[in-house]
Image (cartoon, helix red, strand yellow):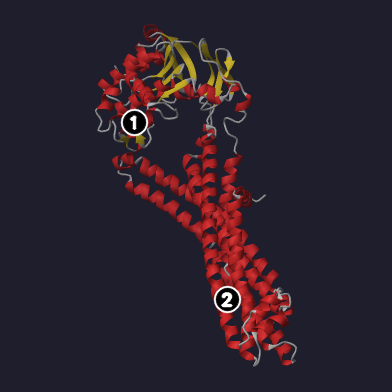
Amino acid sequence: MNPFWHFAARLTKSKWQLGAAIGCAVVSAGGLGTGLVALAPVLDLLLRSGGTLAGWVQEHAPWVPGWVVDRLPTDPFDGVLALFALLAGMTVLGAAANFGHQYLSLTLCTRIVANIRHDIFKHVVNLPLSTVVSRGPSELVSRVTRDSVALQGGLVALTGKALAQVTKGLAAFLAAIWLDWRITLVALIAVPALAIPLRKFGKRIRRGVRGSLQAQERLLRTASESMGGLRAVKAATAEGESIRRFDEANQDVMRQEMRVRFAQAMSSPLVETIAILAVSGLALVAARQIIEGKLPFETFVLALGALAAAGGSLKPLAGLVNEIQGAAAPAERLQELLDMEREDAGDRRRPSLARHARSIRFEGVSFRYPGAAQDALHSVTLSIAHGERVAVVGPNGSGKTTLLALLPRLFDPGSGRILVDGTDIAGVSVRSLREQVGVVTQDAVLVHGSVADNIRFGLDAGIEEVRAAARRAHADRFIERMPDGYETIVAEGGASLSGGQRQRISIARAVLRDPSILIMDEATSQVDAESEEQINAAIKEFGAGRTTLVIAHRLSTVLASDRIVVMDGGRIVATGRHEDLMGSCDVYARIARTQLVA
């Protein structure tokens, strides 16, 4: 099924609302059709002397009950007045029904697209991190936000505008058939001539919109890189380079959007031209019938007027088809996301991991990042006892962060396996594994919200539990000094806090999880000495009885560890205590002299 129609099928989940919207559209269109039919007796009464409304009804609508006919006005003017009153009433009813249709269809589409956006975002955050890294966050964000807006435009065009125009066109067409079916059938010759170009233009628009959305992804990526790293841009006086890169992406967006301009601009004039030619041909056929006395002139005028009303209602369909075809491309891109396998696929069939109590073991683990030319890890084997504090050191790019990222399955190894208490983590549910792992990274990730919300991030915890976690993380004192305490709003990215404050909130978040495994990825690399002392005290207290893995660049952190693991080139080259490694491992001795800060 075409992805657009796959998403459009979700509209049927709200059967009552969709049915009400369609019902309102039918009533609105019925008002138009009734008005066109009602013009026939008006013309008859005006053009023929001695006629009455009752007589016209008996002649042309014998199915009307007799008691209704008896109540109709006998005076011609009163008959015309009654018909105009009917037209006015139908106009008001049609306008009210049209409002109801548009209101209900817009409400329905907005809710359905919100649900689609929720489903897609939920799917994206559960994708493997390797997929996110290979595609880039900007592409995924663009699809979730921009593509869903484009899809909503197509759904609104389908349920709102297109449905209204089609029902009105059909009502006018049925009125034309009732007035004179022969003229109407001749007009149908134009339908295939309209359908063929619309189909061709639709395909071209769909391809062009897909290219435009891809170009907009690149534009979003470029803008995000520049704005996210604005401090570095200004420090390097690279404003000109950032503008140049943005302009290149912006020009690409423009080129892609210009590709569809011919099809969008040409469809409406072409439809109008075909329609005018069809009406001209129809007029010639009718003129001959009128001259020969086979067709009353007023019937021709009414039928032609009804067909003109039908054509006027269907005329916007060219633009609406373009909108729907344009929505097909974002629908395809959204469906591509939903077709990607989630990292927790099959989790329900996997057992939960029992709380870690014995050991962690890496066995022959190798890993390569997507698109990389060589492995980041080469056959790494390492055993860690429960409760042990291990410091991992090594030059930049040696694989320290990559190794520890494999433990909570942020990535899966290309070969080898990781065992927790003898259980291969690939065979247990991802959620049960990650619930046991607390991670504090070099860059603490904080969201726009209260301090309490940032501490309980991902957990349903009460304020007292949050306060207890903050105390254990040595964060309660500075939080209490804030204007609103734990309800103080944190700026986006934690910009309103110092580096040490952000790290201690991040540690409080890990404390609240009560993990059995604690991973510290250079958690004190960007803080001052006082903050480092408080962070180390918090880690020492909280780490007791837990397995702690630390990527460190400070000598004090390394010396406080039970064991040091030295990595270089994606391999473990040595393990031991500081004193032993200084004399036996050249890599560690060089790191201790040049990289470890006292």
Residue 31 % position (x, y):
59, 70
Position above or below: 57 against 441 = below
Does any portion of residue 259 appear in the rendered image?
Answer: no
**Of the pair 286 and 129, the residue shown nearer to us:** 286
What residue is at 49 percent from the left and 20 percent from the top?
436
Three-letter code, disc 1? Val
Task: Measure the C-alpha gap from mark 1 to mark 2.
Answer: 65 Å
Which quarter of the figure has residue 552?
Answer: top left
Three-letter code, disc 2? Leu
Position above or below: 530 against 318 = above
* Residue under pointer 1: 451
Position above or below: 377 against 589 = below
What residue is at 44 percent from the left and 49 percent from the top?
219
Mark closer to the chain start, 1 or 2: 2
Q: Secondary structure at mark 2?
A: helix
Residue 304 % position (x, y):
65, 80
Q: In the image, is 132 to the left or to the right of 224?
A: right
**Of the pair 451 and 373, the residue shown nearer to us:** 451
- Count of numbered circles in the view: 2
Q: Residue furthest top?
A: 580
What residue is at 67 percent from the left and 76 percent from the top?
68
**Of the pair 119 and 583, the residue shown nearer to us:** 119
The numbered disc on residue 86 is 2
**Of the pair 252 and 580, the residue shown nearer to us:** 252
